[in-house]
Image (cartoon, rainbow, N blue to C red):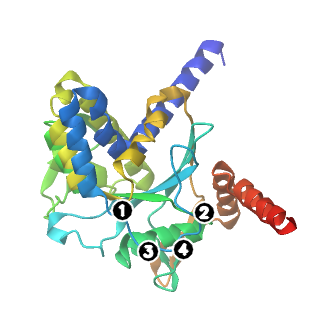
Amino acid sequence: MSHDRRSHKNQKKRLRRKRLVTFILLPILFLTLSATAYGAFLYHKAQTVMSESYTPVERETSRKKVDPKEENTSILFIGVDDSNVRNFDSGSRSDALMLATFNEKRKSVKLLSIPRDSYVYIPELGYEDKITHAHANGGVVSTIETVEGLLDIPIDYYVKMNFNAFIDVIDALDGIEVEVPYAISEMDSKDRRNAINLQPGYQDLNGEEALALARTRKQDNDIERGKRQQEIIKAMMDKTVSAKGLTKYADVIEAVGDNMTTDLSFSEMKSFIDYAVEGTGVNVETLSLAGNDAYIDSVYYYQLDEEDLDNVKETLNKHLELSEATNTADNNEYQDDQE
């Protein structure tokens, strides 16, 4: 392979990683980029919206609250199969789970996608089931506890968004341009069957149409659906930072805030902007969980590979430097005992 081809390939890989960082930090970016957009009005609006979205949860945690400005941090992003017709019930299933770990000194990010059908132990239920059912049985707290047990690391913060975020943000931007790979017929956000019909091709989509494209997996699988969702997010970001999109910032901030809950404060959110604006300079590694299709009592599950899961646990532990922190704490306690 020539030097030019390798350079082009590496550049494309860096761009994909930048898109993934943008994707995972989307709620944070929408609520904080206003500080650099057009002034104090939007900044104040973002603060107001953030205070309304701030929803801490009571749960047991294995370590004290961390400061993302100075410490390594983990955030669990929960995409929930919610809509008005489902009354935004805490019993809704999680449709997408992604864990992000941030190493403050290295300014590096690791992103782990957790398949929704993964067969895992759910503490709230007391038995193994699809991880998507953790949110249906105990909401955010149950989901956090399940992921912590699965990966053996603490979850410091969460960000939860529902499907209406797609609709409201895209409509606030007056639609987006995106590629539809094949003809689709999907339900809308009110669960009306075959309400959205799209033909293949590059085209303008409104919020409902984009949501239908993001949800469909009838003709392929979750992996391809994930790629489509990334392209939709990219189109949203491209429209947002365009000259036309900037005039819509107030509506976009409102749309995100209306569809998000998080235990990140506004000041804590701003601590993560460095990771986003670093662009291609950020060291980003995407992780996945290997596994196999399995049927248990005639029900489909994604059976995780135990050896691969152990490797992912070790990777995340090292990235958060948890072992190092534990050793330091043990040494301090030993020194205290000797004095």
Residues marked 3 and 4 touching at CB (< 8 Å) = no
Residues marked 2 and 3 touching at CB (< 8 Å) = no
**Which residue corresponds to mark 3?**
142
Kind of element beneath mark 4 = strand
Pointer 1 or 3: first along the chain = 1
Between 201 and 227, the one lying in front of the other is: 227
Kind of element beneath mark 3 = helix
Pointer 3 or 4: first along the chain = 4
**Which residue corresponds to mark 1?**
95
Q: Nearer the viewer, mark 3 or mark 4?
A: 3
Q: Is residue 335 above or below residue 43?
A: below
C-alpha separation, residue under disc 2 versus residue under disc 3: 15 Å
Three-letter residue code for mark 1: Asp
Between 335 and 143, the one lying in front of the other is: 335
**Which residue corresponds to mark 4?**
120
**Residue 178 rendering spot, x and y as whole percentages:** 26, 35
Kind of element beneath mark 2 = loop
**Residue 338 rendering spot, x and y as whole percentages:** 87, 66
Q: Quadrant of residue 230?
A: top left
**Residue 202 rendering spot, x and y as whole percentages:** 24, 32
Picture residue at 27% right of the left edge, 37% below the top: 236
Q: Nearer the viewer, mark 2 or mark 1?
A: 2
Picture residue at 20% right of the left edge, 36% below the top: 42
Three-letter residue code for mark 3: Ser
Task: Identify the disc placed on residue 153.
Answer: 2
Three-letter residue code for mark 4: Val
Pointer 4 or 2: first along the chain = 4
Quadrant in the picture for the N terminus: top right
Picture residue at 24% right of the left edge, 24% below the top: 242
Q: Residues within 10 Å of mark 4 (few under 14, many from 20)?
A: many
Kind of element beneath mark 1 = strand
